[in-house]
Amino acid sequence: MAARRRRNGSPALGHDAFLDIVANLVGILIILVVVLGSRTEEVAELIRSARHTVEPDSDAPFEPLKDSLTIDALEEQLLDLDRETSRAAQALAASQRLEAMIRTSDMELEAARERRDQWLDLLAAAKEAWEEKQLELDEQIVQRGKVEAQLVSAKSELETLRATREQAAKNDRPVVAVSHLPTPMAKTVFGEELHFRLKAGRLAVVPIDRLVDAIRNDFQRSAGGSRDGRMDSAVGPIQGFVARYEMDKSKETINQGGRIGTATRVQLVAMVVEPLSEPHGQPLEKVLADNAGPLDIELAGRNPDKTTVTVWVYPDSFAEFRRLKEHLYQRGYATAARPLPMGQPISGGPQGSKSTAQ
């Protein structure tokens, strides 16, 4: 505010100083006019006296003028008076110009004051509007702080509820529906056997018979070779599975009707069946719901009394195996389970055992 007062007072101080200068000039002009007037009166009196002195008396004889120096001095004073009068007129004209400039400056100053007042009014209105907006912004900041605090509190309550729910879920024992199945009677499988693998809740058809046929064909090709001993090989993929096996080839002497000859003997030592990639198969839920799924395709056209379903099942799918067993029981098929430890593939050999169906 002090700075604004200083800014507002600066033009007024300059204007007052200018007016003082003009007033001094006017005073000087007035003094000059008074002096010139008095000088003019004196000179006029001297001229009248001189004229009276130099006028010849008609009765008196003419005598030469002795006061010629006085007339010259008067003329010189008249010239000085003319010069002073001219300077006074010039000063008066300058004074009038200054007065006109002062009036113009006063008008411009008044207009500037009016514009300044308008700008001050606009500035005051803008400041008032800014203060109102600042108050609104402060209120919004306060409201935002309250909302953020409520949000933090709600998040904390939500985390507490989640922790409570998780703890309750851990403490609550799941209700298991026990479905009754007839007491199973175990019997060795001698008829047709279908193989499935159940891992991670996914059911897949294991084409054991087709893989064994492929191994047998490989044996026939290997029998004609000259190499003996144990050899590793693989067949497949068939329906996504590969069989890796080890065979033993040897030559033996045989006696046929008194005739001694040599025969080539090829024997399977071990076999491992694995899928090409994991996870393999379809979710059991989808298989049971699909009437045209892999299970129904394999069972189509088969006699339930002469067909056994063997399931190679891993520990993570025992619950799914029970559901599959119930489903097959309702359709009249006997089920054989072949539990496998996690990480162990399906394997077999010449000394392997047959499945036991229930």
Image (cartoon, rainbow, N blue to C red):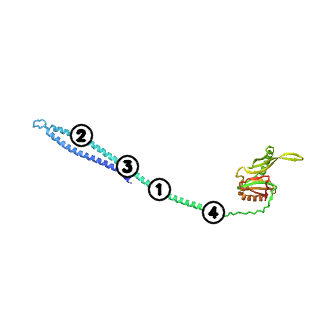
Alpha carbon separation for disc pair 2 and 4: 120 Å
Q: Residue 195: x percent and y percent?
A: 77, 54
Callout 2 secondary element: helix
Q: Residue 296: x percent and y percent?
A: 76, 54
Outermost residue on the right side: it is: 257
Among numbered discs 3 and 2, the one appearing first in the sequence: 2
What residue is rendered at 45% in x and 54% in y?
A: 130
The amino acid marked with disc number 2 is Arg
The amino acid marked with disc number 1 is Gln
Alpha carbon separation for disc pair 4 and 3: 80 Å
Among numbered discs 4 and 3, the one appearing first in the sequence: 3
The amino acid marked with disc number 4 is Gln
Mark 1 is surrounded, within 10 Å at the Cα level, by few (under 14), some (14 to 19) or many (20 or more) other residues, namely: few
Q: Quadrant of residue 222?
A: top right
* Left-right relation of 112 to 31: right
Among numbered discs 4 and 1, the one appearing first in the sequence: 1
Alpha carbon separation for disc pair 2 and 1: 73 Å
Among numbered discs 1 and 3, the one appearing first in the sequence: 3
The amino acid marked with disc number 3 is Ala
What residue is rendered at 29% in x and 45% in y?
A: 96
- Can see residue 299? no
Look at mark 2 in the image and give the residue it sits on.
83
Alpha carbon separation for disc pair 4 and 1: 49 Å
Tell me whether the residue at label 1 lies in contact with that at label 3, contact meaning CB atoms closer than 8 angstroms: no
Residue 134 is marked as 1
Q: Nearer the viewer, mark 4 or mark 3?
A: 4
Look at mark 3 in the image and give the residue it sits on.
112
Callout 1 secondary element: helix
Residue 230 is marked as none
What residue is rendered at 33% in x and 47% in y?
A: 103
Q: Quadrant of the C terminus?
A: bottom right
